[in-house]
Image: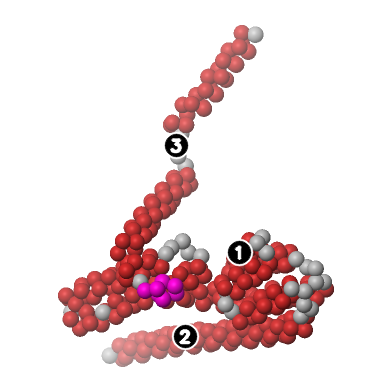
Amino acid sequence: MTIIAKFSALAAILYLVKVFIYPFFKPVQGKQKKRNRRYLKERKNAQFNHKLQDFKRTFATKYVTRLLGNAERLRYQKMIDRLDLPMKPEELRAEQIFYAAAGLIVTVVFMSANQLLGYVTAIFIILGWLYPISEMEQKIERKNKNIAFDFPAFYSMVYYQYSKSVNIYLADVIRDYLPNANNDMAEELGVMLDNIEYGEEYALKQLKKRVPIHYIIKFCDLMETRLKGYDNISQMVYLKNEVDSYRIIALEEDLEKRQRINSRIQLVLILVLVVYIAIYYLFTILDSIKMFQ
């Protein structure tokens, strides 16, 4: 019994040492070090970005409000709402000012070195002013293009469901299609699902405002008419043929674009090969000339 008691006491002491003392002296593994460093770096970046956003927001609120007209404010707000960004139009104008100021600094630095070079780099002031707006417009255009490309498949599912029965709930069709949607289309359908809680008609009107694409506007109008009790299956067939033809044209354009890219790559490879062969024969000729000398 005394032996068992001693072993039990020893086991208890070893357990307490492992739990309370060993962690202080346990060597940290390499993966854990990298993970901790990455976490600290991400945390510092997040803190820096948060401070930068606070500074930009404060600067925009104090100094930029008067530099923004009502028309520009409305335009910027529509772009921000379209991308669902947590910012105000004044902050977008502040970004324009910051980028233009950076371009001005670059211009002054290069002009101090060379006057002609300074005049050339002055273009960065204009580019800095235009960059935030053009970047947002490109994002919106890219998002609309992805949605328009994915919309025919979604509408085909809606059409086949509604052609079978009028009593189909649109939210069920959206949930069935969501796993097959691309990121931009899935985001819009997710917002539409949230809006359907306030009614299908409200969700369709909000979709038209967010994504003012021709086919989506027609789709929303057809669905709103159908909600009022009208049988518009003939118009739905017409729209289906229209979006199918659009998808075929989009696929053909994408195929032509890929073919052009492949042709350019092949041309570049041929040019590289020609240059390599020319260099090889040039060194061969030079070696031959040295041998005869």
Quarter of the N terminus within the rendering? top right
Tell me the distance, in whole angstroms, between the alpha carbons under discs 3 and 2: 53 Å
Label 2 packing within 10 angstroms: few (<14), some (14-19), many (20+):
few
Q: Amino acid at mark 2?
A: Val
Residue drawn at (48%, 26%), measured in percent from left and top? Answer: 20
The residue to which callout 1 is attached is: 191
Provide the major secondary structure of the magenta segment.
Answer: helix
Query: Between 239 and 147, which is closer to the camera in this rendering?
Result: 239
Label 1 packing within 10 angstroms: few (<14), some (14-19), many (20+):
some
268 sits to left or right of 121 = right
Residue drawn at (75%, 66%), measured in percent from left and top? Answer: 169
Query: Between 115 and 200, which is closer to the camera in this rendering?
Result: 200
Residue pushed farthest front?
A: 228
Query: Between 199 and 243, which is closer to the camera in this rendering?
Result: 199
State the image coordinates of residue 209 (x, y, percent, origin top left).
57, 73
Sequence order check: which comes first, mark 1 or mark 3? Answer: 3
Residue 21 vs 187, above or below: the answer is: above
Question: In the figure, residue 55 lies in which quadrant?
Answer: bottom left
6 sits to left or right of 115 = right
The residue to which callout 3 is attached is: 27
The residue to which callout 2 is attached is: 268
Residue drawn at (19%, 77%), measured in percent from left and top? Answer: 111
Quarter of the C terminus within the rendering? bottom left
Q: Amino acid at mark 1?
A: Val
Asked which secondary structure carries label 3, the reply is loop
Residue drawn at (82%, 71%), measured in percent from left and top? Answer: 165
Query: Which segment did they paint magenta?
Result: 69-75
State the image coordinates of residue 125 (x, y, percent, origin top left).
29, 76
Question: In the figure, residue 271 lies in which quadrant?
Answer: bottom left
